[in-house]
Amino acid sequence: MTLRPRITRLMLRDFRSYRALDLRAGAALVALVGDNGAGKTNILEAISLFSPGRGLRRAELRDMRHMAQGGAPAGEALADEAPADAATFAVSITLDEESGGARLGAALEERAGALSRRSRIDGEAVSSPAAFAEYVRIVWLTPAQDGLFAGPPGDRRRFLDRLVLAVDASHGARVNAFERALRSRNRLLEDPRADGAWLDAVEREVAELGVAVASARRETADRLAALAATRRDAPSAFPWAALRLDGAIEDMVAGAPALDVEDHYRRLLRDGRARDRAAGRTLSGPQTTNLAVRHGPRDMPAELCSTGEQKALLIGLALAHARLVTAMSGMAPLVLLDEIAAHLDPGRRRALYLELTELGAQVWMTGADPALFGELPAGAQLLRVTPGTAAPFVAPL
C-alpha cells in the first residue's frame, strides 16, 4: 500500500519573516497567495528542511533566523522541538492520522556560541534529517531552476543529486564525503613533498566514494528515463524528457562490477597526477559529469528549446520524479512548487492541477495572483499570506 502523508499543521518560531505561525492544512492541494515578499516561499522552505540538505534555497541555516530575533517565548507545540533557551529558530510539522500522526521538528540551536542543526521525531532527538525519510519524502521546483537546461553542468549535477536524495537519503552524505576527499587530494598535489602512500590512500577513498556516487546517479537517471518512456504516448501538456549522463565513471558502472570500476578510477587518478597538479584540480571523475536533457517529443536538446518549452519540460520532469519517488519508496512525496503557475496559460494551469491531483501527493504551491488558482479542483485549500501571517483566503466582495 502506498503511503500518502499530508501535513495537517505547520508551526514556525523565529523563522525568516515569521516570529510565530500556527498554520492548519490537510488538503491535497494547498495554494499560498500573497504579494511578493509576503513570506510564501519561506513556508515552502520551512517544509523543505524535513529532507536532507540545506533546503530549497540552499541557504545557510544562520540566514534562516528571524530578522528581528530576540526573546519571543516558545509556543507550547514547539517546546519539544527545541528548548526555548537554546533555539534560534524552530519548525514543526504534524502529519495526518492515516500516516501515523507523527510530529517532526527541525531547529537551529545555539550552545556555547556554536550553531547546530537539531532534528526531532515526536519530541525525541534523531541523528540527522535523513531520519525524516521514514515519514516524508520531499521534492520541489523553484524559479531558480528555470535556467537549469542552459546553465552550467554543475547546476544540473546538483539537480540530479537532489533527485537521487529524494529516493536515497544517504546520497547527500556520500556526495559531501566525495567532495571532501577530492579537496584533500588537491591539497596533497599542491605539495611536491607529499607522501606517496598518503596520496594513494586518499585516491582509494576518492575512487570508492566516486563510484558510489556515480552508481546512485546512474540508477536514478535510468529509472527516471524508463518511467518517462512508459508515458511517451500519453497526452500531456508537459512533455517527457530524455536523460543521458555524460561521464566516464557513470558509463562504466552501467556495465562493470563496482570493484573493477574503482580500480580503473584509481589508475586514472594515479596516472593523471601531473596533469591535475598543473590544473590545480582533479579533472576526471563524477565531479565533471553532465546531465544532458532532451525534449522527448521534439528530440531536441533542452537548452535549444524556447523558454516556454523549457518550463513545460521542467514541470514534466518534476512530475515524473514525484512518480518515481512514489514507486521506489512506497510513499507519495510532499511536492513544493514555488511560483509554478505564473507563466502558464489557463489551459496548461488546468492540465497541471489535474496531473497534480492524479499524483495523490500533498502539493504546496505559491502565487501572487489568486486568479492563478481559479482552476483548482474542489477541496483545494487557498491561504492568504501577509507578512508574518497566513490565513484562509477570503475573496473580496
Image (cartoon, rainbow, N blue to C red):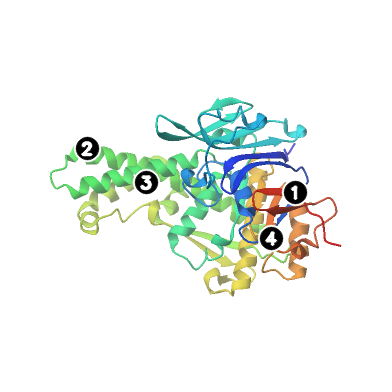
Asked if labels 4 and 3 touch by Cβ distance under 8 angstroms, the answer is: no
Image position of 256 (left or right of 194): right
Asked if labels 2 and 4 touch by Cβ distance under 8 angstroms, the answer is: no
Query: As rendered, which of 279 and 55 lies closer to the eye?
Result: 55
Which residue is drawn at the image coordinates 45% and 39% (left, top)?
173
> Residue under circle 4?
367
User: What is the spatial separation of the Cα atoms under label 4 and label 1, in whole angstroms?
Assistant: 15 Å
Q: Is residue 352 visible?
A: yes
- Among all residues in the image, which is located at the extreme left? 193
Element type where label 3 sits in the image: helix
- Residue 137 x, y percent position in the rendering: 62, 42
Label 4 crowd bin: few (<14), some (14–19), many (20+), radius 10 Å = many
Query: As rendered, which of 105 and 96 lies closer to the eye?
Result: 105
Query: As rendered, which of 307 and 213 lies closer to the eye?
Result: 307
Frontmost of labels 3 and 4 is 4
Label 2 crowd bin: few (<14), some (14–19), many (20+), radius 10 Å = few
Label 1 crowd bin: few (<14), some (14–19), many (20+), radius 10 Å = some
